[in-house]
Amino acid sequence: MQSIAERLMHNPVFTRVYTGIWRPLFTRGFSLGGTETLDYDRALRAYLGRPGERQVLDVACGPGNYAVDASRGLTGDGRYIGLDFSASMLAEAQRLLSTGSRSGTGSRSGPWVFVRGDAHALPFGDDTFDTVTCLAALYLIPDPLAALDEMVRVTRPGGELIVFTSVRASVAALPGADLVTGLSGLKIFGRRELLDRLDALGLTQIEQTITGVGQYVHARKPSAGEPS
Ligand SMILES: C[S@@+](CC[C@H](N)C(=O)[O-])C[C@H]1O[C@@H](n2cnc3c(N)ncnc32)[C@H](O)[C@@H]1O
């Protein structure tokens, strides 16, 4: 049976309010009303927009929240590929990008491509992408560690993986927290759960930044010949 959260992601009314209302509130909620998540998010957008000829894969991209930022600095054959399994989220991404309202610059075209697919079985070859992101989505994916393995598989040696998801904080231990997460279908990760998995997969430079009940994880896949 689909969880409440999964059902919402396929609901066209929800996808229309996601970008302007839901995501900003949710981002703030991760810092329990503080600004740490928002601050990190701004820095991340700037980082994703740095110049370079990169192949970027955004897993569970939703309505393309990061498409413009991650495309801004792309040069040459650089591409942003957004993957999601919700047709209504992808339709909303196309709508926002084609009207130019997403970019705020009126620009209607960019080096972005959207693909419908499942994070558990990414339709790409091994070692393909320079940057793989999965933002505000891993906690919704039924088998998140299998999806993480897939993201590592498609990251090229020397490439990076960036994840933003939930993390167990003291508030998550409060009575009722398990009921809320159980009903909504959102998973809360243990503090070391993702780090240990990435370490076991041989990733290096694994950094975790906790912003309340959210965590950003940044890791690199070692280049050929580099010790893992
Ligand atoms: C909360 S939205 C996040 C969207 C965007 N990354 C952001 O930061 O705003 C979560 C997205 O994960 C997608 N999703 C959930 N499970 C998925 C799966 N197994 N494969 C691909 N996408 C999935 C949903 O359709 C939804 O668009």
Image: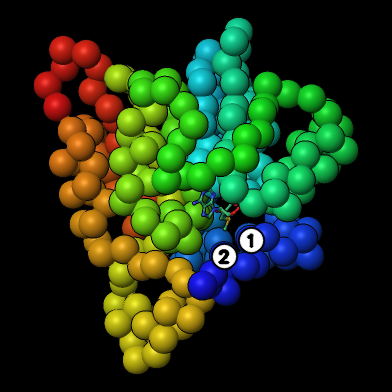
Write down the quadrant of residue 77 in the picture: top right
Q: Which mark is residue 9?
A: 1
Residue 12: % across, % down: 77, 60
Q: Does mark 1's beta carbon lie closer than 8 Å to ligand 1?
A: yes
Depth check, front residue: 179 or 19 = 179
Residue 13: % across, % down: 79, 65
Amino acid type indicated by mark 2: Glu
In the picture, the quarter occupied by the C terminus is top left
Residue 30: % across, % down: 48, 66
Q: Does mark 2's beta carbon lie closer than 8 Å to ligand 1?
A: yes
Residue at (46% x, 27% y) in the render: 124
In the visual, does 107 lie left or right of 161? right
Residue at (57% x, 65% y) in the render: 6
Residue 132: % across, % down: 44, 33
Classify mark 1: residues with Cα within 10 Å, few (<14), some (14-19) or many (20+).
some
Depth check, front residue: 164 or 119 = 119
Are the residues at dot 2 and dot 1 in contact (C-beta closer than 8 Å)?
yes
Residue at (22% x, 13% y) in the render: 224
Q: CA distance from mark 2 to mark 1?
A: 5 Å
Write down the quadrant of residue 153 in the picture: top left
Amino acid type indicated by mark 1: Met
- Label 2: state its secondary structure: helix
Instruction: Say whether residue 135 is visible.
Output: yes
Vertical position of residue 216 compared to residue 83: above or below: below
Residue at (36% x, 68% y) in the render: 188
Q: Which residue is mark 2?
A: 6
Toward the bottom, the furthest residue is 175
Q: Which mark is residue 56?
A: none
